[in-house]
Image (cartoon, rainbow, N blue to C red):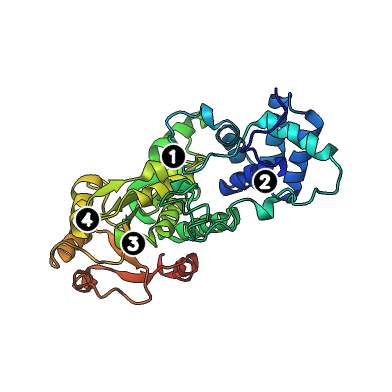
């Protein structure tokens, strides 16, 4: 292997910092200590020990079973992007080299060099000053403004949308707390419990066999209670472009915590529950892709009609909760939205409308629908969701 760097190769510390930054983007807790340990492992194993180095870095960076499952995909994506199929990347600049063996060999070269940096050369980047941290300007000479193109992939442009792992964890914890407080509804079924309210005659007779037919160990039953079924409908039309990422992350938290069914709509309705419940390495990029993939106008009434007649026909019953995330601006006729909401209420479901403004939007269709909505809740941040926690029982 040729140890010399290609013209577009990056310093080894910067390569490792970029890799650590990508790991943090996907929820792995890789800080300064882990980054230093990975650097030391690279120095100890050398450039020709690729598989051993991969295993060592995995042991350093992964702190949970979820991290362990994500690692192979993340490692291949960063160091061997040419192996990934079905991905097209177009950019105005050539990508820096990410060859693992070359980067490790450069670590040795860099560490063996004199400690004093040569004039005009910058020190290797660390995790706090990873490349791209200050490339958010829109000037003509900036790396992100190259004749209308950008060197950053569309799914990675998360200005104002990037969440730290601890923030995602706090949101998931809040969703679990709200789910636990949702008032369960009684069903017609009974289940075995001790003590109970009703004698389970069949189970009691079976137990009496061991006692010669004497019912010495009676079995009891209680009425089975189930948590309410939760449906979340998120508006991803053009007017909601700035708020859709927040709404979708909240929807995903409840899809995991409460097994909620999640739908997105603009001029049509689509279910994204499998995507929301999947615990993959690129879930943040996929959520951004859902947001970017929609747009155009909004047909809330038509989407609600499809929701009632097609998607939730068998599950929308008494006690179900329907949460709508939208600003209420609808291109359907003003009288269509109240009619669609009444169809939801007739199934026994309770409707909560989350809007991104402090006050209820002044849209005509939404004003006419006030009687059909149980409550309106402002939702512009996770703090708003925490403040409304007592209203969602």
Give the mark toward the camera: 3 or 1.
1
Mark 4 or mark 3: whose residue is earlier in sequence: 3
Is the residue under label 4 in contact with that under label 2 (CB below 8 Å)? no
Give the CA distance from mark 3 to mark 2: 35 Å
Mark 3 or mark 1: whose residue is earlier in sequence: 1
Identify the residue position indicated by label 4 in the image: 304
> What secondary structure is found at the residue carrying circle 4?
helix
Instruction: Name the residue at 18% across, 48% down.
Output: 309
Specify few, some or many for label 3: CA neighbours under 10 Å numbering under 14, 14-19, or 20 or more. Answer: many
> What secondary structure is found at the residue carrying circle 3?
helix
Give the CA distance from mark 4 to mark 3: 17 Å
> What secondary structure is found at the residue carrying circle 2?
helix
Specify few, some or many for label 2: CA neighbours under 10 Å numbering under 14, 14-19, or 20 or more. Answer: many
Mark 2 or mark 4: whose residue is earlier in sequence: 2
Q: Position of residue 293 (x, y in %)?
A: 33, 48
For residue 171, above or below residue 270: below
Give the CA distance from mark 1 to mark 2: 23 Å
Q: Which mark is residue 240?
A: 3
């Amino acid at each position: 292997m040729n140890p010399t760097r290609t013209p577009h190769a990056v310093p080894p510390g910067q390569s490792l910092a970029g890799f650590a930054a990508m790991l943090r983007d996907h929820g792995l807790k890789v800080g300064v200590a882990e980054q230093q340990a990975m650097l030391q492992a690279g120095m100890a194993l050398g450039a020709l020990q690729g598989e051993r180095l991969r295993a060592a870095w995995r042991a350093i960076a992964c702190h949970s079973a979820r991290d362990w499952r994500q690692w192979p995909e993340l490692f291949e994506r960063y160091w061997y992007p040419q192996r990934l199929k079905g991905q097209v990347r177009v950019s105005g600049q050539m990508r820096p080299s990410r060859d693992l063996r070359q980067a490790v060999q450069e670590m040795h070269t860099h560490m063996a060099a004199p400690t004093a940096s040569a004039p005009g050369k910058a020190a290797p980047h660390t995790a706090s000053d990873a490349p791209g941290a200050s490339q958010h300007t829109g000037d003509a000479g900036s790396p992100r403004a190259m004749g209308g193109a950008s060197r950053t992939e569309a799914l990675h442009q998360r200005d104002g949308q990037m969440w730290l792992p601890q923030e995602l964890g706090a949101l998931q914890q809040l969703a679990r707390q709200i789910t636990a407080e949702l008032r369960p509804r009684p069903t017609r079924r009974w289940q075995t419990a001790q003590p109970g309210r009703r004698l389970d005659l069949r189970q009691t007779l079976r137990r009496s066999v061991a006692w010669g037919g004497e019912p010495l160990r009676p079995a009891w039953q209680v009425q089975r209670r189930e948590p309410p079924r939760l449906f979340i409908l998120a508006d991803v039309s053009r007017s909601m472009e700035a708020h859709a990422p927040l709404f979708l992350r909240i929807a995903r938290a409840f899809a995991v915590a409460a097994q909620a069914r999640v739908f997105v709509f603009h001029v049509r309705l689509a279910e994204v529950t499998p995507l929301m419940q999947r615990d993959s390495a690129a879930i943040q990029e996929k959520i951004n892709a859902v947001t970017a993939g929609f747009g155009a106008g909004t047909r809330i009434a038509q989407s609600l009609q499809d929701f009632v007649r097609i998607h939730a026909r068998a599950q929308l019953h008494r006690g179900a909760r329907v949460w709508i995330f939208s600003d209420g601006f609808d291109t359907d006729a003003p009288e269509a939205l109240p009619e669609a909401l009444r169809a939801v209420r007739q199934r026994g479901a309770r409707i909560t409308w989350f809007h991104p403004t402090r006050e209820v939007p002044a849209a005509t269709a939404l004003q006419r629908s006030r009687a059909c909505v149980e409550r309106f809740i402002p939702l512009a941040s996770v703090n708003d969701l925490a403040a409304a926690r007592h209203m969602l029982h």
